[in-house]
Amino acid sequence: MKQVFRMFDTNADGSISKKELAEFMKTMGFVDEDDTPEDVAMMANMLMAESDEDNDGKLSYEEFCKIMW
């Protein structure tokens, strides 16, 4: 799981931003071909709002793991 987290933490700051989360969603197949960039941003915002327990605007490794389970 740590390897997957690091793969999507593209700037290596130890957390996943909304932008990195959107890229993760695309890579993992959570985004359909007909989804617009606005749709993807909305999905990333919703997932971030549900998963960002400390409300810092990014996902820690622990928060990321909860999404994956």
Image (tube, rainbow, N blue to C red):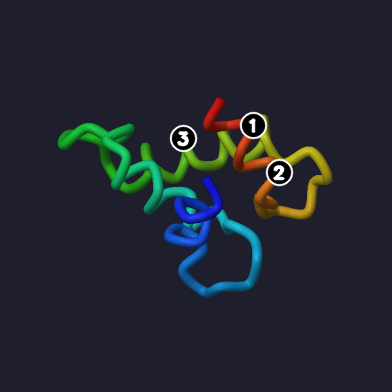
Residue on which disc 1 sits: 66
Q: Earlier in the sequence, mark 3 or mark 1?
A: 3
Type of amino acid at the residue the image marks with label 1: Lys
State the residue at coordinates (78%, 54%).
Answer: 56
- SS for dot 2: helix
Q: Earlier in the sequence, mark 3 or mark 2?
A: 3
Type of amino acid at the residue the image marks with label 3: Met
Position of 19 with respect to 16 (left or right) is left
Mark sitting on residue 62? 2
Q: Residues within 10 Å of mark 3 (few under 14, many from 20)?
A: some
Q: Nearer the viewer, mark 3 or mark 2?
A: 2
Type of amino acid at the residue the image marks with label 2: Glu
- SS for dot 1: helix
Location of residue 8 (image quadrant): bottom left
- x, y percentage for residue 33? 16, 37
Q: Residues within 10 Å of mark 1 (few under 14, many from 20)?
A: few
- x, y percentage for residue 64? 61, 42
Q: Nearer the viewer, mark 3 or mark 1?
A: 1
State the residue at coordinates (50%, 41%).
Answer: 44
Residue on which disc 3 sits: 43
